[in-house]
Amino acid sequence: MPLKIAVLLGGTSAERDVSLVTGLEISKALSEKGHQVTAIDCAYGAKVLTDWSADSKEIIRVEPSEMESRQTTLNRNIFETIRYILDNTFDVVVLALHGGYGENGQLQALLKLANIPFTGSEMLASAMGMDKHVSKSLFRQSGVPTAPWVLLRHPEKYRQEQVKQFGLPLVVKPNDQGSTVGLSIVDELQKMPEAISLAFQHSDSVLIEKFIPGREMTVAILNGEALPVIEIIPEHGIYDYECKYQTGKSQYVVPAEISEQTSRELQNLAQRAYHSINCRHYSRIDFRVTDENEAFCLEVNTLPGMTPTSLVPKAANAVGINFSDLIERIVLLALNSK
């Protein structure tokens, strides 16, 4: 039966450009399935997008969106979005947002309060997934290896003694951002203040963790089941914003060319990480794997990119689930979660 679906996209985070592409591709897929789809850019309240033909190359720039600087005035528009959804009685809301209030649990709380079914994890899981310090703590409690780290609440609190034990290089990143926005790899301690300052431009707290050399792997989870492992081979050696979203900057091996034992271990760890923060519907869990096949969990993405060329659809396609079927399956999971 055709459904009346609202797709929320855009938003005000640094990942706005990626969200626009995700949302437009999801809208096209669901429309082709025969559903009545309304795409809403919630940065501007009830702004309905009627042109879905934009090319992702034209939308996603080399640098993250500067929309963050306007959050103070634009974030309140989300209430107009909620009113629009209530007034138009949609069957379900598809969250195609990345970062900010769209992924950190705030929007999920509003939708739950309004009794509106939505895709992706609920409020608490979203908040814990976005907070890297919290999620890494939960990984550790659940027996999922993760790189050692320290959390900074203020740049002036940084002391070299805190991180010397980790050795160099170090990863410095905002505690609650995605797509490697504000991330630096530091190979000299004298460069730490600059990296910390950059990270604090995107968050109120900053994570400093030991850099894990090795291969980049990711595992998508669909309704609790692990999909095939994907290896990511970025041009820059690290899967940064440009390598994620600029065509040709990364290679993807699906399934990853690793032993069956390593593959099963990564899938098991991904499921454990997924359940440690109580995710639902779908997520993507990122890892670094050393030359000795030791796996370290980096983070859980509770609303990963969902275009036909994104990693979750690539993994689903490897087991015979095409893009439009994948999106419709997630929508039905949301309806059944009421």
Image (cartoon, rainbow, N blue to C red):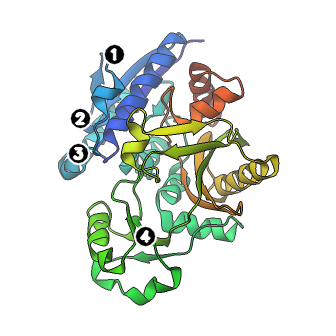
User: How much space separates mark 4 and mark 3, taking CA atoms?
Assistant: 23 Å
User: How much space separates mark 3 and mark 1, taking CA atoms?
Assistant: 22 Å
Q: Secondary structure at mark 1?
A: loop
Q: Secondary structure at mark 2?
A: helix
The residue type indicated by label 1 comes to Ser
The residue type indicated by label 2 comes to Tyr
Q: x, y (%) of residue 59?
A: 29, 30
The dot on residue 207 is 4
Q: Quadrant of residue 102?
A: top left
Seen at 44% across and 35% down, the residue is 96
Seen at 46% across and 46% down, the residue is 108
> Mark 4 or 2 closer to N-term?
2
Neighbourhood count class around disc 1 (C-alpha, 10 Å): few under 14, some 14–19, many 20 upward: few
Vertical comparison of 8 with 186: above or below: above
Residue placed most toward the observer, 5 or 245:
245
Residue 120 located left or right of residue 290: left
Q: Is residue 82 visible?
A: no
User: How much space separates mark 2 and mark 3, taking CA atoms?
Assistant: 12 Å
Q: Which residue is mark 3?
A: 67
User: How much space separates mark 4 and mark 2, taking CA atoms?
Assistant: 31 Å
Q: Which residue is mark 1?
A: 53
Vertical comparison of 330 with 112: above or below: above
Neighbourhood count class around disc 4 (C-alpha, 10 Å): few under 14, some 14–19, many 20 upward: many
Q: x, y (%) of residue 72?
A: 20, 53
Neighbourhood count class around disc 3 (C-alpha, 10 Å): few under 14, some 14–19, many 20 upward: some
The residue type indicated by label 4 comes to Leu
> Mark 4 or 3 closer to N-term?
3
Seen at 23% across and 35% down, the residue is 44
Residue depth check, mark 4 versus mark 2: number of the one nearer the observer? 4
Q: Which residue is mark 2?
A: 44
Neighbourhood count class around disc 2 (C-alpha, 10 Å): few under 14, some 14–19, many 20 upward: some
